[in-house]
Amino acid sequence: MIHLDLNNAKTDWYSIYISYVLLFLAGVQMTVYYTSMWTYLQFLDPTSDINILGVIIASFSVGQGVASPIFGWWCQRTRQIKIPTIVGSAFIILGNMLYAVLPNCSNGSVFTMFLVSRILVGIGAASSGVLRAYIATACIPDDRRKAVSLAIAMVVGGITIGPLIQACFAGLGVTHNKILFMTVNMLTAPSIVMVIIYIIGTIFFWLKFVPVFIGIEEPKKSKQSIEDQSLETDKFILPNYDMTAVVICNFINFVQSSIGTNLEALATVLVISMYNWTDQDAILYNGLLIAASSLLSCKNYFLQAFSFVKNIDQRKLILFGLFVFLSFHLLNYPWFFYTEKLDYIPLDENSTIENTAIHGGCSRKFEWCETITRVPVAIYIATMIICLAYGFPFTFNPNNTLYSDVLGPRRQNSMMGIFEAVGAFARVIGPMIGGYLFNISGPKYTMIFQTVLLVLAVLTIFIFWKRLVPLKLIIKS
């Protein structure tokens, strides 16, 4: 039985704030390697190409996609929050430790170990869904949008810090310097820092976190999932959620996640090809752009938590975010009226090796270098900061809140696990499709593919507008 008498209930902000700590660290983990993974792969294996990068990036999401429903089921079955979260953090620590020692692996095993390290971190990242589901059920309905907005703001705050951590070590360069048995350079130092930070954060969570659920009382004897049944009290009936609305929220999550992962997979190789940036330039400048965008994103999340924006229809906010993403892709498409052509990577005298650590430019292995036009760098910089800073907050946050409202005041761990798995699935196929399209056409077909997904998401919202509403309790007469 679910107890729905919330007249005297108060949001348990203490446990929510502690949850924010690990969500912040999860945000750091998302972007700390955002700008350096391509360079790290080239450092470990100079023969690697963009398709291998796509597979490695996708491996993170494979781990997350498989583990998310398992974590959700585990929490649903055992009514535990703390232990699954600690286990997830342990996987992240192990994955980062392996990432740091990849230079010690033999050439034949480095690709496999790279995959394993990212899969381990992906499995650990799945535990974030546990905390987000907890936050949605640790607050009264009037505080839900604020609590969810701040949760995502914490993630974005971490996303802001991630590239800055990487940029702080840019001065170490891409070297083979060793301390004890470990190679320490700008590519491995961030993973060492992440291990230390996660150990401290996990200990803090273990000592301080005590879960408190607001407005939920479980059946004491039945082990049936409360997400799969209508529930009744003396005053209310909690009906089943609208499956159509659930599917649409998951589709929007798929679209938004595919955009994020394609940016992660292609941003570095794109700017090296498009603007002649070296590896170090790409890591530093993209890191600064992401940090600037994330700072502005935080402002937008706080707007949704504390200003009049929190009272705007969530469907309208989602549409706004999707249209901002559309503008990003349209502006960064290599249109014919962008007349400047790309340059090939300069070759050193008596050499056929393209060394992007020294010279940026378009690789001769890409046939499209001759036909693709250069998007003005000012447009790239402006859209990376402004469009992403408005697109993600006004898509991800209201969609998460709407999804929670559609499910209603019931334990949401399993359904949040599915939500996380859908996003992970998008991040699995996104880099593979994006990498393939980038190989054959540069940014052109990738932009078209993302634009089609965005248009479908917009049309779906308009068509099912009346279904995308919070679950309404039935009051007994």
Image (cartoon, grey):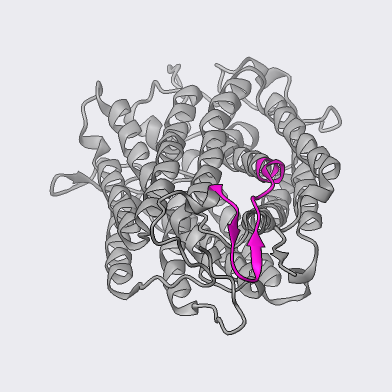
Residue 268 visible in the shown view: no
Q: Is residue 156 left or right of residue 192?
A: right
Q: Position of residue 446 (x, y in %)?
A: 67, 28
The residue at the far left in this view is 180
Q: For this rendering, which residue is in front, 473 or 430?
A: 473
Q: For this rendering, which residue is in front, 65 or 142?
A: 142
Position of the C terminus by quadrant? bottom right
Q: Is residue 328 left or right of residue 289?
A: right
Give the tally of numbered discs: 0
Q: Quadrant of residue 442?
A: top right
Q: Quadrant of residue 291?
A: bottom right
Membership of 246 in magenta stretch: yes
The magenta segment: 228-248
Q: Is residue 144 left or right of residue 468?
A: left
Residue at 33% across, 49% down: 92
Residue at 71% across, 24% down: 445
Residue 329 visible in the shown view: yes
Q: Position of residue 166 (x, y in %)?
A: 42, 53
Q: Position of residue 421 (x, y in %)?
A: 50, 40
The residue at the far bottom in this view is 8
Q: Position of residue 30 (x, y in %)?
A: 47, 50
Q: For this rendering, which residue is in front, 191 or 344?
A: 191
Q: Is residue 268 left or right of residue 76?
A: right
Membership of 406 in magenta stretch: no
Residue at 54% across, 71% down: 215
Residue at 28% across, 32% down: 113
On screen, residue 142 above or below 251: below
On screen, residue 346 above or below 87: above
